[in-house]
Image (tube, rainbow, N blue to C red):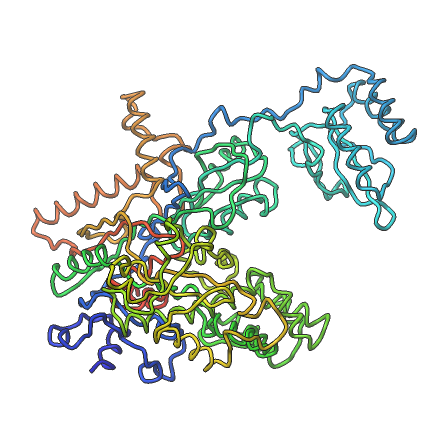
Amino acid sequence: MLKTLCSKLRRHHLLLTKTLLPNILKPYCYRFLEHTLLPATMKTMDESDVGISCYISNLPGFSGILKQRYSDFIVNEVDVDENVVHLTSLEAPKECSVNKAVNISDQLNRSYVTEIESFRSLAGNSDADKLKAFIDELNSGADVSDESIVLSPSSDKSHRTAIHNFFKERLKFLVTDTIDGVEDQSKCVRVRLNNDRNNGRGRSSRKRKDRDDKRYDSRGSDSWPGHLGKFLRFHLFKENKDTQEALNVIAKMLGVQLRSFGFAGTKDKRAVSTQRVTVFKQQASKLAALNKRLIGIKVGDFCHVKEGLLLGQLYGNRFTITLRGVSAESEDIIKASAVALGKYGFINYFGLQRFGSSSVPTHLIGSALLRGEWKAAVSLILDPREGEKNAISTVREYYKESGDIDGTLRQLPRYLVAEKAILQCLKRSPGNYLQALKAIPRTLRMMYVHSYQSYLWNHAASMRVQKHGFDQVVLGDMVYSKEEYKVKESFVADCEDVNDNNMDDYSNLDEISETDLPEERNIPVKVINEEDLKSGTYTIDDVLLPLPGSRVIYPSNDIGEVYRDLAQKDGISLTETAHKIKEFSITNMTGAYRRVFQKPKDFEWELLSYTDGTIPLAETDFDVLAKSVKSKVREEDPTNGSKELPADSSAISVGGDMLSGKVREEKINNEAEMQSEKSQSGGNAEESQMALKLSFTLPASCYATMAVRELLKTSTSVAFHKSLND
């Protein structure tokens, strides 16, 4: 009966019937014996494959569609001070303005004899004469905005630094940078007019390809005001774009490198999200001006700060999730499930996103690395996969059959970073599979090993719930010690929630996976004994399980054996390494701890009725901002109520799935009028549907999809919910 029930849940998300409910254990686990419940023909990864198998509640599930629209999944970052990050303004405040332009007219028409003679003693006669001639040309009124002088080659970096500093301090109307010299290993300092309007990008300047030149860098232009922090912090609002993709667009528009940006965590692609970002030495006015050109992205709420953001510097995320097409035997089931989620929470599993979405889960690659099977790991990354796009599958098949590296690289999509890195290395060093694996960017290659840690943790959590329930602490459980240390609730930045993107698209990596416990790392962990049980000091909310590593301990009860047994079946030891490559060894990893149960904070929910599935049921930050701007315009000019708003206010388009505040309001009103007319004329109105809207805050290590799973009792896989939209 249990096997039949599980099959129905996975295939059709049917409601549990009242006759079956008495047979469901509390807590409810739909699968632990994977080989009996998972068909051999199954191509895509199932939750049970990675240890996600239990629920806290024995309430029946109900049907509902996750992420039917981007605005059905709204994510707002919560900073370290527990402030929810919102987009509230698109304008650059005056106090953020940076007057970097140098008033050249005030500094020219001088001979600069003293400065040139000082420069002569620093750089020599030849360079001093070049500088004098250049300044004389400037004083003559000639247009030299595209001209420069190149000083003598120098391989002495300290000498070049002294020259850069000389211009910063003595001749601020000129700017310098460093270019390659004619001779090997030599560098030259280049000098030009400090005119930002023609920094190789202005309309009047020639294209760099026509000048046979490269763009100037800005290292010699250090006119940044001392009273402003060197980092501009802003709020990034985006729709249907992952964080890296959005920042890459902005970086190209600004003409800066992607590494100039800092952020606390990646945010989901198929969603509407707002988060903090920092960028090095940029004017707020420049970023604000991009809003008119950005599609699906908006930036605002600017301020200057002294330090840039780093991965993991956040408290968590605030979610507003709308489940559409909700259906159950009765509304009472939905209401009871929502109440139970707020009261008891959910099992704090690592979601499917942690393991990728292809038929080759990342933890399988991780286990091969831990065993030292380099060639096998390379094959898992390169070989053809079930269910992959035809174009990619064709490339993989081509390489497997032909071994043609050059031909494969020409066809390989750019976003397949790991595959590209491996093939390029194998081209240089055929057969050196370990070196090829090390050629993969570190964040990505470590993701495989961290994924295996998460795989073990999920299975241990399922066994803990299956054997000991969710309502009491048992002997041998692990907790943070309250006797020696007052535990401050801080969060593991192991995984930035809700990234449901194909993990083969490495533009949105789980980049925080390398971060352990920044605040809890040194908090003592203890194993529950008889005295602890009698005192009642610890509750189920305190129970932890370890992510395997050299510095963690394991539960002293039967759950500790789950780790060792499962790893042993995979040919992996948790205490001894199978090879000498430290980065692919669990014994070289620190490890961490993770709470088994998670309750959503500031939990709210409501049932909604709707007839038009194209109308958003939750307001995004942009919607709120558009209303505010519209209201402000009407207050300032009451006669403007029927006029179109400016293009930079509520009429800004944020993407195909988003309507501006004005257009959305008109659409809602028109829809209501149409329904009213149909009703009055006796026509059949569109069928009303129900939606469940949830709002809650979770730590950065938690997956909102696992909270949704606790409600629906169905898979949270992208493929499953896409099938419900068909």
Query: Is 420 on the left or on the right of 456, as rendered?
Result: right
Quarter in which the N terminus is drawn:
bottom left
Count how many numbered circles sit on residues in the image: 0
Q: Residue at x 78, y 32 (%)?
A: 191
Q: Residue at x 80, y 15 (%)?
A: 110
Query: Is 561 on the left or on the right of 122, as rendered?
Result: left
Query: Is 398 above or below relative to 443?
Result: below
Please tell me which residue lies in front, 399 or 372: 372
Residue with the most extreme right position = 125
Please tell me which residue lies in front, 707 or 458: 458
Q: Residue at x 31, y 61 (%)?
A: 597
Residue with the most extreme front position = 531
Query: x and y percent of residue 550 in the render?
Result: 52, 67
Can I make out residue 508 in this image?
no
Residue 274, located in which quarter of the rendered image? top left
Query: Is 437 on the left or on the right of 689, as rendered?
Result: right
Please tell me which residue lies in front, 710 or 533: 533
Residue 482, located in which quarter of the rendered image? bottom left
Query: x and y percent of residue 172 in the render?
Result: 72, 24
Query: x and y percent of residue 503 in the render?
Result: 48, 64
Residue 403, located in which quarter of the rendered image? bottom right
Query: x and y percent of residue 87 in the render?
Result: 39, 38
Query: Is 706 above or below relative to 172?
Result: below
Can I make out residue 582 in this image?
yes
Please tell me which residue lies in front, 131 or 317: 317
Q: Residue at x 37, y 72 (%)?
A: 556
Quarter in which the C terminus is drawn:
bottom left
Query: Is 307 on the left or on the right of 646, as rendered?
Result: right
